[in-house]
Image: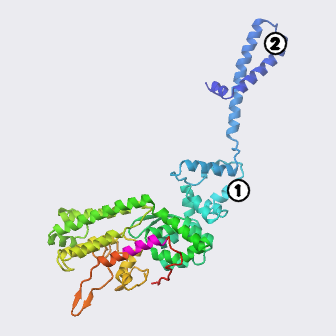
Amino acid sequence: MWLFERVKKRPYLAVATTFFLGAVSCFIVPVVTTVSIVSIVITAGICIVVGLSLGGCLGWLVEKINSNRPVPVSEVDLVFQKQEEEKHNLSQPVPSVFENEVKKLDGVSTSLIQKAFSSEEDYTSILASYLDHNDAGNLTQTSITLYRSFISSSQGKAGLKLLQHAVCGEEKEINAFVKDRSPQQLQFLLFTFETTITHYSGQQIKGNFIRILLGAEDTDMIRMIQPVLIRACGSEKAAQAELKRQYDAQFSKESKEAEAKKAAADSAALHKMIQAIHNAEDKDCEDLLVQVDDSKDTENTAVGLARAQFRAHWNEKTKAVITSGKHSNAEPLAKAFNQYDANYHAFGNHWNSPKNKLVWRQVIGWIERYVSTCIAQALRQGDFYIVNNGEQLRRSLQFRFSPSYSDFSLSSDGLRLGYDYAVFGRWPRPSGMFWVRELFGPFFTTYVQKKQRDGELICTVSANSGQRQVVAP
Protein backbone atom coordinates (compact mmCIF):
# COMPACT_ATOMS: atom_id res chain seq x y z
CA MET A 1 0.00 0.00 0.00
CA TRP A 2 2.83 2.42 0.87
CA LEU A 3 4.55 1.61 -2.43
CA PHE A 4 1.29 2.05 -4.39
CA GLU A 5 0.68 5.50 -2.83
CA ARG A 6 4.15 6.71 -3.82
CA VAL A 7 3.73 5.38 -7.41
CA LYS A 8 0.28 7.00 -7.61
CA LYS A 9 1.69 10.41 -6.59
CA ARG A 10 4.52 10.30 -9.16
CA PRO A 11 3.64 7.70 -11.89
CA TYR A 12 6.10 9.25 -14.35
CA LEU A 13 9.02 7.97 -12.21
CA ALA A 14 7.70 4.38 -12.28
CA VAL A 15 7.09 4.47 -16.05
CA ALA A 16 10.51 5.93 -16.75
CA THR A 17 12.23 3.33 -14.54
CA THR A 18 10.31 0.44 -16.19
CA PHE A 19 11.19 1.60 -19.71
CA PHE A 20 14.80 2.02 -18.66
CA LEU A 21 14.96 -1.57 -17.32
CA GLY A 22 13.22 -2.84 -20.46
CA ALA A 23 15.82 -1.16 -22.66
CA VAL A 24 18.63 -2.66 -20.61
CA SER A 25 17.02 -6.13 -20.81
CA CYS A 26 17.03 -5.98 -24.60
CA PHE A 27 20.80 -6.10 -24.46
CA ILE A 28 21.24 -8.51 -21.54
CA VAL A 29 18.67 -11.28 -22.32
CA PRO A 30 20.14 -12.37 -25.68
CA VAL A 31 23.53 -12.76 -24.04
CA VAL A 32 22.29 -14.71 -21.02
CA THR A 33 19.67 -17.05 -22.56
CA THR A 34 17.97 -18.05 -25.75
CA VAL A 35 15.35 -15.58 -26.92
CA SER A 36 11.86 -17.09 -26.74
CA ILE A 37 8.27 -16.10 -25.91
CA VAL A 38 8.67 -17.40 -22.37
CA SER A 39 11.91 -15.51 -21.72
CA ILE A 40 10.41 -12.30 -23.09
CA VAL A 41 7.30 -12.56 -20.85
CA ILE A 42 9.36 -13.36 -17.76
CA THR A 43 11.78 -10.50 -18.47
CA ALA A 44 8.89 -8.05 -19.04
CA GLY A 45 7.26 -9.05 -15.73
CA ILE A 46 10.51 -8.62 -13.86
CA CYS A 47 11.06 -5.18 -15.46
CA ILE A 48 7.55 -4.01 -14.49
CA VAL A 49 7.80 -5.17 -10.87
CA VAL A 50 11.31 -3.83 -10.37
CA GLY A 51 10.47 -0.60 -12.24
CA LEU A 52 7.43 0.10 -10.09
CA SER A 53 9.42 -0.61 -6.93
CA LEU A 54 12.29 1.64 -7.93
CA GLY A 55 9.84 4.34 -9.09
CA GLY A 56 8.08 4.28 -5.69
CA CYS A 57 11.40 4.52 -3.86
CA LEU A 58 12.50 7.43 -6.02
CA GLY A 59 9.16 9.16 -5.38
CA TRP A 60 9.63 8.85 -1.61
CA LEU A 61 13.18 10.22 -1.93
CA VAL A 62 11.99 13.26 -3.94
CA GLU A 63 9.27 13.93 -1.41
CA LYS A 64 11.75 13.78 1.44
CA ILE A 65 14.10 16.23 -0.27
CA ASN A 66 11.32 18.72 -1.02
CA SER A 67 10.02 18.69 2.55
CA ASN A 68 13.39 19.97 3.83
CA ARG A 69 13.82 22.64 1.18
CA PRO A 70 12.73 26.27 1.98
CA VAL A 71 9.65 27.55 0.20
CA PRO A 72 10.67 29.93 -2.60
CA VAL A 73 8.50 32.89 -1.55
CA SER A 74 9.52 36.54 -1.59
CA GLU A 75 9.05 38.89 1.34
CA VAL A 76 6.58 41.01 -0.60
CA ASP A 77 4.56 37.92 -1.63
CA LEU A 78 4.41 36.85 2.02
CA VAL A 79 3.05 40.22 3.18
CA PHE A 80 0.38 40.36 0.49
CA GLN A 81 -0.57 36.73 1.05
CA LYS A 82 -1.19 37.49 4.73
CA GLN A 83 -3.23 40.61 3.89
CA GLU A 84 -5.45 38.57 1.57
CA GLU A 85 -6.09 36.07 4.36
CA GLU A 86 -7.05 38.88 6.77
CA LYS A 87 -9.54 40.35 4.28
CA HIS A 88 -11.54 37.09 4.45
CA ASN A 89 -11.47 36.95 8.24
CA LEU A 90 -11.16 40.44 9.74
CA SER A 91 -12.82 39.37 12.98
CA GLN A 92 -10.00 36.96 13.85
CA PRO A 93 -7.01 38.85 15.30
CA VAL A 94 -3.71 37.27 14.39
CA PRO A 95 -1.60 36.58 17.49
CA SER A 96 2.10 37.26 17.07
CA VAL A 97 1.87 38.59 13.53
CA PHE A 98 3.58 36.35 10.92
CA GLU A 99 5.50 34.56 13.69
CA ASN A 100 4.82 31.08 12.29
CA GLU A 101 5.62 32.16 8.72
CA VAL A 102 8.93 33.71 9.79
CA LYS A 103 9.96 30.47 11.51
CA LYS A 104 9.30 28.53 8.29
CA LEU A 105 11.56 30.74 6.18
CA ASP A 106 14.74 28.76 6.68
CA GLY A 107 17.30 30.00 4.20
CA VAL A 108 15.28 32.91 2.82
CA SER A 109 16.45 36.49 3.39
CA THR A 110 14.18 37.80 6.17
CA SER A 111 15.87 41.08 7.06
CA LEU A 112 12.75 43.19 6.40
CA ILE A 113 10.47 40.81 8.27
CA GLN A 114 12.82 40.50 11.22
CA LYS A 115 13.09 44.28 11.41
CA ALA A 116 9.31 44.63 11.39
CA PHE A 117 8.33 41.83 13.74
CA SER A 118 11.18 40.93 16.04
CA SER A 119 11.56 44.38 17.61
CA GLU A 120 9.27 46.18 20.03
CA GLU A 121 8.26 48.60 17.28
CA ASP A 122 5.10 47.40 15.54
CA TYR A 123 5.13 46.88 11.82
CA THR A 124 2.35 49.43 11.22
CA SER A 125 4.63 52.29 12.24
CA ILE A 126 7.16 51.07 9.66
CA LEU A 127 4.49 50.98 6.96
CA ALA A 128 3.14 54.34 8.11
CA SER A 129 6.52 55.96 7.59
CA TYR A 130 5.97 55.48 3.84
CA LEU A 131 2.36 56.75 3.91
CA ASP A 132 0.72 60.07 4.64
CA HIS A 133 -1.44 60.40 7.76
CA ASN A 134 -4.75 59.84 5.98
CA ASP A 135 -3.60 56.70 4.14
CA ALA A 136 -2.12 55.30 7.35
CA GLY A 137 -5.39 55.90 9.18
CA ASN A 138 -7.46 54.35 6.39
CA LEU A 139 -5.17 51.31 6.34
CA THR A 140 -6.05 50.57 9.97
CA GLN A 141 -9.75 50.21 9.08
CA THR A 142 -9.02 47.15 6.92
CA SER A 143 -7.75 44.86 9.66
CA ILE A 144 -8.11 44.41 13.40
CA THR A 145 -4.41 43.53 13.61
CA LEU A 146 -3.41 46.70 11.79
CA TYR A 147 -5.78 48.73 13.96
CA ARG A 148 -4.41 47.38 17.26
CA SER A 149 -0.84 47.96 16.15
CA PHE A 150 -1.61 51.46 14.91
CA ILE A 151 -3.28 52.47 18.20
CA SER A 152 0.00 51.79 20.01
CA SER A 153 2.03 53.83 17.52
CA SER A 154 2.84 57.51 18.00
CA GLN A 155 0.19 58.62 15.51
CA GLY A 156 -2.41 56.38 17.11
CA LYS A 157 -1.61 57.65 20.61
CA ALA A 158 -1.94 61.24 19.43
CA GLY A 159 -5.32 60.58 17.83
CA LEU A 160 -6.56 58.70 20.89
CA LYS A 161 -5.54 61.54 23.21
CA LEU A 162 -7.36 64.12 21.08
CA LEU A 163 -10.57 62.08 21.03
CA GLN A 164 -10.43 61.73 24.82
CA HIS A 165 -10.17 65.52 25.10
CA ALA A 166 -13.18 65.85 22.77
CA VAL A 167 -15.38 63.47 24.76
CA CYS A 168 -14.38 65.20 28.01
CA GLY A 169 -15.04 68.68 26.61
CA GLU A 170 -11.50 69.87 27.40
CA GLU A 171 -11.16 72.98 25.26
CA LYS A 172 -7.89 74.24 26.69
CA GLU A 173 -6.18 70.89 26.09
CA ILE A 174 -7.53 70.67 22.53
CA ASN A 175 -6.26 74.15 21.72
CA ALA A 176 -2.78 73.26 22.94
CA PHE A 177 -2.85 69.91 21.14
CA VAL A 178 -3.65 71.22 17.64
CA LYS A 179 -1.71 74.50 17.88
CA ASP A 180 1.50 73.53 16.07
CA ARG A 181 0.22 70.67 13.91
CA SER A 182 0.75 70.67 10.15
CA PRO A 183 -2.28 70.70 7.83
CA GLN A 184 -1.61 67.07 6.92
CA GLN A 185 -1.52 66.03 10.57
CA LEU A 186 -4.69 68.02 11.29
CA GLN A 187 -6.56 66.30 8.46
CA PHE A 188 -5.64 62.95 9.92
CA LEU A 189 -6.42 63.87 13.55
CA LEU A 190 -9.67 65.74 12.87
CA PHE A 191 -11.26 63.75 10.06
CA THR A 192 -9.58 60.37 9.51
CA PHE A 193 -8.60 58.80 12.81
CA GLU A 194 -11.46 57.20 14.71
CA THR A 195 -11.79 54.79 17.60
CA THR A 196 -14.06 54.01 20.56
CA ILE A 197 -13.88 56.24 23.65
CA THR A 198 -15.69 55.70 26.96
CA HIS A 199 -17.57 58.67 28.38
CA TYR A 200 -17.91 59.50 32.10
CA SER A 201 -21.34 57.87 32.04
CA GLY A 202 -20.00 54.56 30.74
CA GLN A 203 -21.35 55.14 27.25
CA GLN A 204 -19.04 53.95 24.48
CA ILE A 205 -18.72 56.44 21.64
CA LYS A 206 -17.05 55.71 18.31
CA GLY A 207 -16.13 58.33 15.73
CA ASN A 208 -13.54 60.81 14.57
CA PHE A 209 -12.89 64.12 16.31
CA ILE A 210 -15.46 66.21 14.39
CA ARG A 211 -18.21 63.59 14.55
CA ILE A 212 -17.72 63.17 18.29
CA LEU A 213 -18.22 66.92 18.75
CA LEU A 214 -21.29 66.86 16.49
CA GLY A 215 -22.78 63.88 18.33
CA ALA A 216 -22.26 65.63 21.66
CA GLU A 217 -23.92 68.78 20.23
CA ASP A 218 -20.81 70.65 21.34
CA THR A 219 -21.39 73.61 19.03
CA ASP A 220 -19.21 75.89 21.17
CA MET A 221 -16.21 73.64 20.61
CA ILE A 222 -16.90 73.40 16.86
CA ARG A 223 -16.98 77.19 16.59
CA MET A 224 -13.76 77.44 18.55
CA ILE A 225 -12.04 74.89 16.30
CA GLN A 226 -13.17 76.42 12.97
CA PRO A 227 -9.91 78.35 12.34
CA VAL A 228 -8.09 75.05 12.77
CA LEU A 229 -10.47 73.38 10.29
CA ILE A 230 -9.69 76.09 7.73
CA ARG A 231 -5.97 75.54 8.26
CA ALA A 232 -6.41 71.79 7.83
CA CYS A 233 -8.52 72.02 4.67
CA GLY A 234 -6.69 74.91 3.04
CA SER A 235 -9.63 77.27 2.64
CA GLU A 236 -12.83 78.37 4.35
CA LYS A 237 -14.97 76.88 1.58
CA ALA A 238 -13.24 73.49 1.78
CA ALA A 239 -13.52 73.49 5.58
CA GLN A 240 -17.24 74.22 5.40
CA ALA A 241 -17.76 71.46 2.83
CA GLU A 242 -15.88 68.96 4.98
CA LEU A 243 -17.85 69.96 8.08
CA LYS A 244 -21.11 69.51 6.17
CA ARG A 245 -19.97 66.09 4.98
CA GLN A 246 -19.15 65.03 8.54
CA TYR A 247 -22.53 66.34 9.75
CA ASP A 248 -24.44 64.37 7.11
CA ALA A 249 -22.52 61.22 8.02
CA GLN A 250 -23.25 61.64 11.74
CA PHE A 251 -26.93 62.51 11.29
CA SER A 252 -28.08 60.28 8.49
CA LYS A 253 -31.74 59.57 7.80
CA GLU A 254 -31.45 56.20 9.53
CA SER A 255 -29.87 57.70 12.66
CA LYS A 256 -32.61 60.34 12.89
CA GLU A 257 -35.29 57.64 12.69
CA ALA A 258 -33.51 55.65 15.42
CA GLU A 259 -33.27 58.79 17.58
CA ALA A 260 -37.00 59.40 17.24
CA LYS A 261 -37.70 55.90 18.55
CA LYS A 262 -35.29 56.36 21.45
CA ALA A 263 -36.85 59.73 22.31
CA ALA A 264 -40.31 58.15 22.39
CA ALA A 265 -39.03 55.37 24.68
CA ASP A 266 -37.34 57.92 26.97
CA SER A 267 -40.54 59.96 27.22
CA ALA A 268 -42.55 56.85 28.03
CA ALA A 269 -40.08 55.82 30.76
CA LEU A 270 -40.16 59.33 32.27
CA HIS A 271 -43.97 59.51 32.19
CA LYS A 272 -44.26 56.11 33.86
CA MET A 273 -41.90 57.17 36.66
CA ILE A 274 -43.66 60.50 37.29
CA GLN A 275 -47.03 58.76 37.35
CA ALA A 276 -45.75 56.21 39.87
CA ILE A 277 -44.55 59.04 42.16
CA HIS A 278 -47.90 60.77 41.74
CA ASN A 279 -49.75 57.64 42.90
CA ALA A 280 -47.31 56.79 45.71
CA GLU A 281 -47.58 57.57 49.40
CA ASP A 282 -45.14 60.07 50.89
CA LYS A 283 -43.73 57.35 53.16
CA ASP A 284 -42.83 55.16 50.18
CA CYS A 285 -41.03 58.10 48.60
CA GLU A 286 -39.20 58.82 51.87
CA ASP A 287 -38.05 55.20 52.00
CA LEU A 288 -36.57 55.48 48.49
CA LEU A 289 -34.72 58.65 49.48
CA VAL A 290 -33.09 56.69 52.29
CA GLN A 291 -32.61 53.39 50.43
CA VAL A 292 -31.07 54.90 47.31
CA ASP A 293 -29.89 51.57 45.86
CA ASP A 294 -32.35 49.18 44.27
CA SER A 295 -33.07 45.94 46.13
CA LYS A 296 -35.86 43.49 46.77
CA ASP A 297 -36.94 45.60 49.72
CA THR A 298 -37.35 48.74 47.62
CA GLU A 299 -39.07 46.97 44.74
CA ASN A 300 -41.96 45.68 46.87
CA THR A 301 -43.79 48.98 46.28
CA ALA A 302 -45.08 50.27 42.96
CA VAL A 303 -42.91 53.39 43.05
CA GLY A 304 -39.84 51.35 44.04
CA LEU A 305 -40.37 48.96 41.14
CA ALA A 306 -40.91 51.90 38.80
CA ARG A 307 -37.59 53.41 39.93
CA ALA A 308 -35.73 50.17 39.22
CA GLN A 309 -37.28 49.97 35.74
CA PHE A 310 -36.54 53.65 35.08
CA ARG A 311 -32.87 53.20 35.97
CA ALA A 312 -32.62 50.02 33.92
CA HIS A 313 -33.97 51.86 30.89
CA TRP A 314 -31.21 54.46 31.04
CA ASN A 315 -28.53 51.91 31.88
CA GLU A 316 -29.28 50.20 28.57
CA LYS A 317 -27.66 53.18 26.86
CA THR A 318 -24.23 52.06 28.05
CA LYS A 319 -24.44 48.60 26.48
CA ALA A 320 -24.14 49.55 22.81
CA VAL A 321 -21.43 51.52 21.02
CA ILE A 322 -22.79 54.83 19.72
CA THR A 323 -21.62 55.42 16.14
CA SER A 324 -24.10 57.99 14.83
CA GLY A 325 -26.72 60.51 15.90
CA LYS A 326 -26.70 62.29 19.24
CA HIS A 327 -24.72 60.69 22.02
CA SER A 328 -27.30 61.81 24.54
CA ASN A 329 -30.58 63.52 23.73
CA ALA A 330 -31.05 66.46 26.10
CA GLU A 331 -34.79 66.69 25.48
CA PRO A 332 -35.76 64.07 28.12
CA LEU A 333 -33.89 66.14 30.72
CA ALA A 334 -35.77 69.26 29.62
CA LYS A 335 -39.03 67.33 29.96
CA ALA A 336 -38.00 66.16 33.43
CA PHE A 337 -37.39 69.76 34.54
CA ASN A 338 -40.78 70.74 33.12
CA GLN A 339 -42.44 67.83 34.95
CA TYR A 340 -40.84 68.99 38.19
CA ASP A 341 -42.25 72.48 37.64
CA ALA A 342 -45.69 71.20 36.62
CA ASN A 343 -46.06 68.85 39.60
CA TYR A 344 -44.34 71.03 42.21
CA HIS A 345 -47.56 72.03 43.99
CA ALA A 346 -49.22 68.61 43.66
CA PHE A 347 -46.10 66.91 45.07
CA GLY A 348 -46.06 68.94 48.29
CA ASN A 349 -45.54 72.56 47.25
CA HIS A 350 -42.09 72.61 48.84
CA TRP A 351 -38.65 71.66 47.58
CA ASN A 352 -38.14 69.49 50.67
CA SER A 353 -41.29 67.39 50.27
CA PRO A 354 -40.61 63.66 49.70
CA LYS A 355 -42.11 63.54 46.20
CA ASN A 356 -40.38 66.68 44.96
CA LYS A 357 -37.06 65.50 46.38
CA LEU A 358 -37.51 62.11 44.72
CA VAL A 359 -38.18 63.72 41.34
CA TRP A 360 -35.26 66.09 41.75
CA ARG A 361 -32.64 63.68 43.02
CA GLN A 362 -33.50 60.36 41.42
CA VAL A 363 -35.34 61.31 38.23
CA ILE A 364 -33.67 64.53 37.07
CA GLY A 365 -30.36 63.51 38.66
CA TRP A 366 -30.45 60.08 37.04
CA ILE A 367 -30.99 61.49 33.56
CA GLU A 368 -28.14 63.95 34.18
CA ARG A 369 -25.75 61.00 34.56
CA TYR A 370 -26.03 60.36 30.81
CA VAL A 371 -25.80 63.85 29.33
CA SER A 372 -22.90 64.94 27.11
CA THR A 373 -20.01 66.65 28.86
CA CYS A 374 -20.82 70.08 27.40
CA ILE A 375 -24.35 69.82 28.88
CA ALA A 376 -22.93 68.73 32.23
CA GLN A 377 -20.58 71.72 32.18
CA ALA A 378 -23.46 74.09 31.38
CA LEU A 379 -25.57 72.68 34.23
CA ARG A 380 -22.76 73.20 36.74
CA GLN A 381 -22.12 76.72 35.49
CA GLY A 382 -25.86 77.42 35.34
CA ASP A 383 -27.63 77.42 31.98
CA PHE A 384 -29.70 80.37 33.26
CA TYR A 385 -26.57 82.54 33.20
CA ILE A 386 -25.67 81.32 29.71
CA VAL A 387 -29.16 81.94 28.29
CA ASN A 388 -30.16 85.13 30.15
CA ASN A 389 -26.82 86.77 30.93
CA GLY A 390 -24.96 85.75 27.78
CA GLU A 391 -22.15 84.00 29.64
CA GLN A 392 -19.82 81.83 27.61
CA LEU A 393 -19.36 78.21 28.55
CA ARG A 394 -16.46 77.97 31.02
CA ARG A 395 -15.53 74.39 30.20
CA SER A 396 -15.39 73.12 33.75
CA LEU A 397 -17.21 70.56 35.87
CA GLN A 398 -16.77 72.80 38.90
CA PHE A 399 -20.02 73.81 40.58
CA ARG A 400 -20.75 77.50 40.32
CA PHE A 401 -21.48 77.96 44.01
CA SER A 402 -19.07 75.24 45.19
CA PRO A 403 -15.97 75.70 43.02
CA SER A 404 -13.89 73.43 45.23
CA TYR A 405 -16.16 70.53 44.24
CA SER A 406 -15.62 69.21 40.71
CA ASP A 407 -16.76 65.68 40.08
CA PHE A 408 -19.20 63.75 37.93
CA SER A 409 -19.89 61.72 41.08
CA LEU A 410 -21.04 58.49 39.48
CA SER A 411 -19.04 56.30 41.84
CA SER A 412 -20.29 54.77 45.06
CA ASP A 413 -18.05 56.97 47.23
CA GLY A 414 -19.80 59.88 48.93
CA LEU A 415 -22.73 61.68 47.31
CA ARG A 416 -23.79 60.31 43.96
CA LEU A 417 -25.50 62.05 41.08
CA GLY A 418 -28.89 60.48 40.48
CA TYR A 419 -29.01 58.99 43.98
CA ASP A 420 -28.42 61.88 46.36
CA TYR A 421 -28.59 65.04 44.25
CA ALA A 422 -29.21 66.66 40.87
CA VAL A 423 -27.50 69.67 39.29
CA PHE A 424 -28.86 73.10 38.39
CA GLY A 425 -26.53 76.04 38.96
CA ARG A 426 -28.73 78.84 40.23
CA TRP A 427 -29.86 80.11 43.63
CA PRO A 428 -33.50 81.16 44.12
CA ARG A 429 -34.13 84.81 43.28
CA PRO A 430 -34.68 87.11 46.30
CA SER A 431 -37.74 89.40 46.25
CA GLY A 432 -38.21 91.63 49.30
CA MET A 433 -38.39 89.44 52.41
CA PHE A 434 -39.08 86.24 50.47
CA TRP A 435 -37.33 83.90 48.07
CA VAL A 436 -39.16 83.42 44.77
CA ARG A 437 -39.04 79.92 43.36
CA GLU A 438 -37.83 79.99 39.79
CA LEU A 439 -39.05 77.58 37.12
CA PHE A 440 -36.27 75.25 35.97
CA GLY A 441 -37.83 73.93 32.77
CA PRO A 442 -37.97 77.11 30.62
CA PHE A 443 -34.28 77.98 31.02
CA PHE A 444 -32.97 74.55 30.18
CA THR A 445 -35.49 74.07 27.36
CA THR A 446 -34.34 77.37 25.81
CA TYR A 447 -30.72 76.30 26.16
CA VAL A 448 -31.39 72.93 24.47
CA GLN A 449 -33.33 74.51 21.63
CA LYS A 450 -30.51 76.99 21.02
CA LYS A 451 -27.96 74.17 20.79
CA GLN A 452 -30.18 72.29 18.36
CA ARG A 453 -30.50 75.34 16.11
CA ASP A 454 -26.77 75.92 16.28
CA GLY A 455 -26.10 72.33 15.30
CA GLU A 456 -28.31 72.61 12.23
CA LEU A 457 -26.95 76.00 11.16
CA ILE A 458 -23.28 75.55 11.91
CA CYS A 459 -22.68 73.52 8.76
CA THR A 460 -24.52 75.91 6.44
CA VAL A 461 -23.24 79.34 7.50
CA SER A 462 -19.88 80.87 6.77
CA ALA A 463 -17.05 79.58 8.93
CA ASN A 464 -16.34 83.12 10.09
CA SER A 465 -19.89 83.99 11.13
CA GLY A 466 -20.61 83.57 14.79
CA GLN A 467 -16.95 83.00 15.48
CA ARG A 468 -15.93 83.91 19.00
CA GLN A 469 -13.39 83.27 21.70
CA VAL A 470 -14.42 80.98 24.50
CA VAL A 471 -13.33 81.97 27.99
CA ALA A 472 -11.14 79.29 29.51
CA PRO A 473 -11.97 78.21 33.05
Where is residue 132 drawn, in percent x and y?
A: 64, 65
Q: Along the line of sight, which residue is nearer the eye, 173 or 263? A: 263
Q: Is residue 391 above or below residue 190?
A: below
Determine if residue 319 is in view: no
Q: Along the line of sight, which residue is nearer the eye, 101 or 316? A: 316
The answer to which image quadrant residue 404 occupies is: bottom left
Where is residue 152 drawn, in percent x and y?
A: 56, 65
Residue at figure coordinates x 60%, y 77% from the top left? 180
Q: Is residue 184 magenta?
A: no
Where is residue 439 drawn, in percent x and y?
A: 27, 80
Crowding at dot 2, Cα within 10 Å, few <14 / some 14-19 / many 20+, comes out as: some
Residue at figure coordinates x 73%, y 21% from the top left? 51
**Amino acid, disc 1:** Ser
The answer to which image quadrant residue 427 occupies is: bottom left
Q: Which residue is mark 1?
A: 111
Where is residue 174 drawn, in percent x and y?
A: 52, 76
* Structural distance between the alpha carbons of marks 1 and 2: 60 Å
Residue at figure coordinates x 43%, y 70% from the top left? 216
